[in-house]
Amino acid sequence: MSLRHICSLAVVATVSAITCFAAGQPIKITEQEDRVRVEIAGELFTEYRFKGAPHVYFYPVIGPGGVHMTRHYPMKSDVKGEEHDHVHHRSLWYSHGLVNGVDFWAETPRAGRIVHDRFLEVKSEGDSGVIRSANKWIAPDGKVVITDELTFRVYARPKKERLFDFEVTLKAHDEEVVLGDTKEGTMAIRLAETMRLKPNKHNEGKPTGHIVHSTGVRDKDTWGKQAAWCDYYGPVDGRTVGVAIFDHPSNPRHPTWWHVRDYGLFAANPFGAHDFEKKPAGTGNLKIAPGKSVTFKYRFYIHEGDEKEGKVAEHYAEYAGK
């Protein structure tokens, strides 16, 4: 029996299923002058943009059916129906608002910059691809406060979903680094405007999105709460689609807090105890000793439907090894 015949069967072993998905959804990663292009089955999925902004980021992020999962602004300012708030919300990114007193979250003259240093690995192997880069977090005075190694790994999946992982290793060098207690951070995405829990001025009266935690907490009550995963779903171009972020059990302070807003900001933040729980300022500080590092791991799962249709809980259990 041929592999093509096997793939057509309704019931196959897990290994065979993964092979079929890979055969139909090849990954291609191409390094360009200012970005790295990621294609799945010959179509653009995302681009890692490492020049031209105060921090590195991924844009666009294209989900099931070719819909754009993230807001276009500020990369594009002429897209109808979008608010132009929070210029630093660049699609999909990792940053933090208080590192040794420097704000790397905002984009202001007094904020720091996350600057691409070099690529450590750029590779695609049919059913998966990886972009691994080193970056410098530079204060306004030119001092390198901390460095990171950012690993993005994407997997071949059925057309109705997308799956990719981030591993972020933050490294201190000659002095201690304090990742400060603030809600402004860290593993973040700014979703498409129509997915918002709260409609913007352009789509009042139209269907909006919903937020749900692994704990069952929903919508407006999710901000500042801890959970193993969070899912944000809503309509885009007539389809209901969602993004789930998984917090790996090995992460410091798992399960993380969620800086998830009704206007479409969606971020895992393990540092904001003061803002989230009204604890004394500094409670959420995390210190990295000189020469040491800390690593955080997250998975993004883009799916059709709500969290139940997308089987978010089951996918998290796979990620967590349960």
Image (cartoon, rainbow, N blue to C red):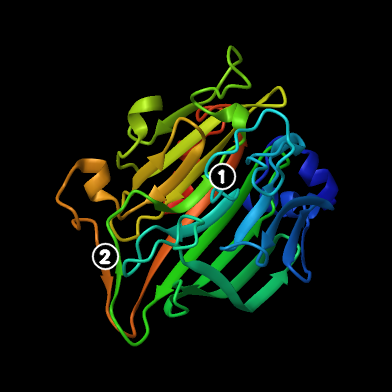
Residue 14's place in the image compared with 252, above or below, is above
- Residue located farthest toward the bottom when viewing the structure as drawn: 174
- Disc 2 element: strand
Q: Residue at x 77, y 56 (%)?
A: 39
Q: Which residue is mark 1?
A: 301
Q: Position of residue 201 (x, y in %)?
A: 58, 22
Q: Of circles 2 and 1, which is in front?
A: 2
Q: Residue at x 30, y 61 (%)?
A: 252
For badge 2, the amino acid type reads Leu
Residue 35 position by quadrant: bottom right
Q: Which residue is mark 2?
A: 286
For badge 1, the amino acid type reads Tyr
Front residue of this view, candidates 221 and 245: 221
- Residue located farthest toward the front when viewing the structure as drawn: 109
- Disc 1 element: strand
Disc nearer the start of the sequence (2/1): 2
Q: Residue at x 53, y 25 (%)?
A: 209
